[in-house]
Image: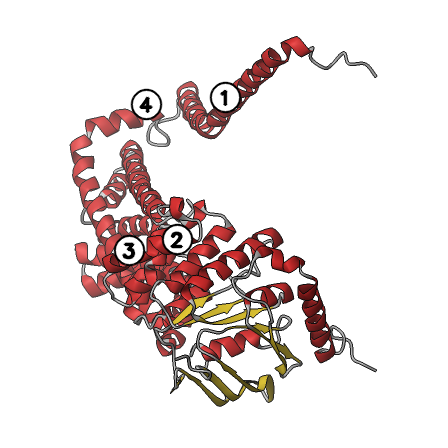
Amino acid sequence: MTDATLPEAGSSADLIRARKAERIARARKAKTLAVFKHVGLPILTALTVLLAWEIVVDLNGIPKVILPAPSDIAERVWSIRALLYKNAISTTTEAVAGFAIATALGVGLATALVYSSWLRAALYPNVVFFQLIPKIALAPLFIVWLGIGAESRLTFAVFISFFPVVVATITGLSNVPADMLRLCRALTASNWQIFWAVRFPYALPHLFSGMKIAITFAIIGVVVGEFITANKGLGYLIMFASSMAETTTILASISVLCAIGLGLFGLVTLAERVVLKAYGHKAA
Amino acid sequence: MTDPHFIRVKDVAKTYVTGATEVEAVAHVDFDVAEGEFVSILGPSGCGKSTLLMMCAGLEPASEGAIAIGGKPVSGPRREFGLIFQDATLLPWKSALENVLFPIEMMKLDKSAYRARAIGLLEQVGLGDFLAKRPSELSGGMRQRVAICRALIHDPSVLMMDEPFSALDAITRDEMNEALARIWETQRKTGLFVTHSIREAVFLADRVLVMSGRPSTIALDFRVPFARPRRPELVEDPEFARICAMLKRTIEDGYGRAGKTAA
């Protein structure tokens, strides 16, 4: 054994500093790589697919009625922007309204079920059972009941986005540590106080996961409603373009729909981050 | 004038009915606690000692017998009780100070009137610099110290503690015992302290009640002879060790040598 690998006494301080700088540089490099891997790579994959799509359509001369190239779709989005805008506003408004109503009703019903064991026994198994029904199959019924107007689409959007909120909120409201509730009882707090000061804040992470599902379901609900009410909205535009074999317009409408979905989901996620951080929950 | 029978537990039993069988968790427990006295209830896990405490706190009804505190029968929770549980059970979104003030909020009292007291209590347990920190920024021992302050904020007459330090490591636990002894010596509440740690029971209490058997009864009512204030060095006293060994034997006898049947 020799001391060859150990630093000489005189240079040890420099060596420690050099090693520290090296470690920092390595950590920085690892971070850059991680950002590329988790942000850059998925974007790159998507762009590659779009590019491949463009090339395949170009090289094989696929007719636009079968499959237009991404550049054609982008062009169409621009040329019919006024039409898309008008219908997008209708779809977005109804989806957001449906989501808001579903969230309010869902939290209300969940609260009632958590506080009343009789109501819970009567309703909760049925709520869970209803989750299993392919609810889209019920959409035509709403037209029979409510006509082809906004009421019908809105009600259907509420109907399908309501259940995830109920189930998630019930889980959340029941998620309070038993000793915390015991403490509240020991302090002779009222049910109302316990709900607002303890149960509801504890339920927030669950409520937000329910809301994230609900916002996507609300959009699906509105679009399905638009398909069958054939009155207005992007879903209606898609059906209309389909009847004219306007594949480019279909895909242009779908692109806008994707952007709306992404935007609304992003807003709920942003709200979740802000609220959960304020309430000291670990980011979901 | 202190009341020698401030807490009266008279012939109390607790039975649970599960299906066709009836399980007796606590059987005919009798004891009194004087006002200002600190009593440890000692026994192994699952001996019904926590159930006994919950009955005293009015959070669970007794199946038989009666409990009276301050001359009035306990029929439900009372604001004159302060509770500490095994976990600190702090609200994660509130600061240490706001958590201490939580009982005041629940009792709809004026929070600003209790702010100075809350800060004083937190300073007394060495958390003066952590008032604005959230539970996630505090260690386990610090969180439990916040819980002690929360139990004391509304100046309760009885402090009830259900294995408050059993989730902490041994070193933190000793620290907490010293912190509790210090703060208790300045506040002088009547204390009921449930634990399965013999050392802890002896270090803190004026009296140790050893619970044994299942259904459990009180096997021994032992008066701890050490003066207050209790110093950390007390645990090195040979007399302290002797008492602990004696209590350990009592528990083992009550359980037929750690659960084995005495043949």
Image-quadrant location for residue A169: bottom left
- Alpha-carbon distance for marks 2 and 4? 66 Å
Say which of A226 and B63 sits in front: B63
Tell me which residue sits at (29%, 26%) in the image: A74
User: Can you give x and y, in whole percent of width and height, for residue B242 in the image?
Assistant: 71, 67
**Mark toward the viewer: 2 or 4:** 2
Marking on residue A71:
4
- Alpha-carbon distance for marks 3 and 4? 65 Å
| Residue B58 visible at all | yes
A66 above or below A135?
above
Tell me which residue sits at (39%, 86%) in the image: B71
Give the mark nearest the N terminus, 1 or 4: 1
Tell me the kind of residue under disc 4: Ser
Question: How many residues crowd around disc 1 within 10 Å: few (fewer than 14), some, or many (20 or more)?
Answer: few
Judged from the image, the secondary structure of the residue bearing numbered disc 3 is helix
Marking on residue A28:
1
User: Can you give x and y, in whole percent of width and height, for residue B70 in the image?
Assistant: 39, 82
Tell me the kind of residue under disc 2: Leu
- Alpha-carbon distance for marks 2 and 1? 41 Å
Marking on residue B122:
2
Tell me the kind of residue under disc 3: Arg
Q: Quadrant of the C terminus of chain B?
A: bottom right
A48 above or below A100?
above
- Alpha-carbon distance for marks 1 and 3? 45 Å
Q: Judge if badges 1 and 4 mark residues of a common chain.
A: yes
Question: How many residues crowd around disc 4 within 10 Å: few (fewer than 14), some, or many (20 or more)?
Answer: few
**Mark toward the viewer: 1 or 4:** 1
